[in-house]
Structures are given as C-alpha cells and as structure tokens.
Amino acid sequence: MDKKDIGKALDIMIERFGHDSLISLATIDGNRPAVRIVNSYYEYGAFYTVTYALSNKMKQIKDNPVVAICGEWFTAHGTGENIGHPCDSKNTEIMTKLREVFAEWYYNGHTDENDPNTCILRIQLTEGVLFFHGARHDIDFTELIE
C-alpha cells in the first residue's frame, strides 16, 4: 500500500474508531476462541479500552497476547497488553483522552479508578483489512510502529 493509500485508510480508521466505539475482541481461552464486545478508542495503530486485570479477557491475554478484533467493516490481528493502571503517571496522556471519549459511561459506577485491578488494555494492531465504499484496504500496521 503506498503512502497516499495508507494515509487515506488511517484517516478512515480515525473517523470510524477515534471515539467511543464498540469492537468485538477475540482471545484464546486454552484451545478455544472467546469473543466479547468492548468499548474502545483508536489512535496511532492501537485500540485502547479500560477494563479489569482479573477479567477473563485479561487472563487470556496474559497467557496468549495474540488477539483479533472486528467492527464496522474492519477486521484485524494484534497484540493485547495491560499497560497499567489509569492513574499511573505513564498513562496520563492516554487517560486524558479515554476519560473524555468514554465520559458518557465512565463515571457511572462501571469504572473504579481506586481499584488497583482497573487497567488499560492496549491492542497494538499488526495487520488489518478495512472496507470503505466497496474498496478493500489491507493495512500493515507494523509499518507504522517506530
């Protein structure tokens, strides 16, 4: 994919997912796939969600970080990682965005930042397929990682 096409595809990604978006997240539970829908936010080749370190998805990602996602005419593979607590100073920048993006539900009792097991899941994409107006865009996200 040339730079013009990758730029267009990434602009579409931001338009579709650069806000509170629902995506399906698939992990591996032993030898079986497990899938669930999560609220997420996309930027710079990664999706972010605030979750709970003791949840099944985080346990599965700890055992096998390879994940797949799907949403709004986009499918991808990536690597899931617990990047720490929302109040950790290294997460200040992303959490400023996530609190704003998820504001509609973030403070309704669903998320407890006082709980040490509250965490941020980053899904660093590796490759994906994006469809837009009948065109297929194959994206190699590893080319975006510095």
Image (cartoon, rainbow, N blue to C red):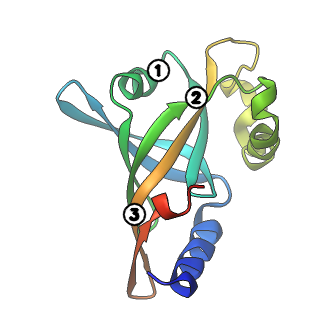
Of 71 and 116, nearer the camera is 116
Kindly state the secondary structure of the residue where label 2 is placed: strand
Q: Amino acid at mark 3?
A: Gly
Q: Is residue 49 above or below residue 72?
A: above
Of 2 and 127, nearer the camera is 2
Q: Amino acid at mark 1?
A: Ser
Neighbours of disc 3 within 10 Å: few (<14), some (14-19), many (20+): some
Which label belongs to residue 51?
2
| Residue 69 at x, y percent in the picture | 40, 51
| Residue 145 at x, y percent in the picture | 56, 56
Residue at the limit of the structure toward the left, as seen here: 31
Q: Amino acid at mark 2?
A: Thr
The residue singled out by tag 3 in the image is: 128
Q: Is residue 115 above or below residue 2?
A: above
Determine the CA span between mark 1 and mark 3.
Answer: 26 Å
**Which badge, 3 or 2, comes first in the chain's sequence?**
2
The residue singled out by tag 1 in the image is: 55
Of 60 and 24, nearer the camera is 60
| Residue 19 at x, y percent in the picture | 68, 57
Neighbours of disc 2 within 10 Å: few (<14), some (14-19), many (20+): many
**Tag 2–tag 1 contact (CB < 8 Å):** yes
Left or right for 124, reference 35: right
- Which residue appears at 60% of the width and 39% of the height? 49
Indicate the quadrant containing the C terminus: top left, top right, bottom left or bottom right. bottom right
The mark tally for this picture is 3
Q: Is residue 73 above or below residue 50?
A: below
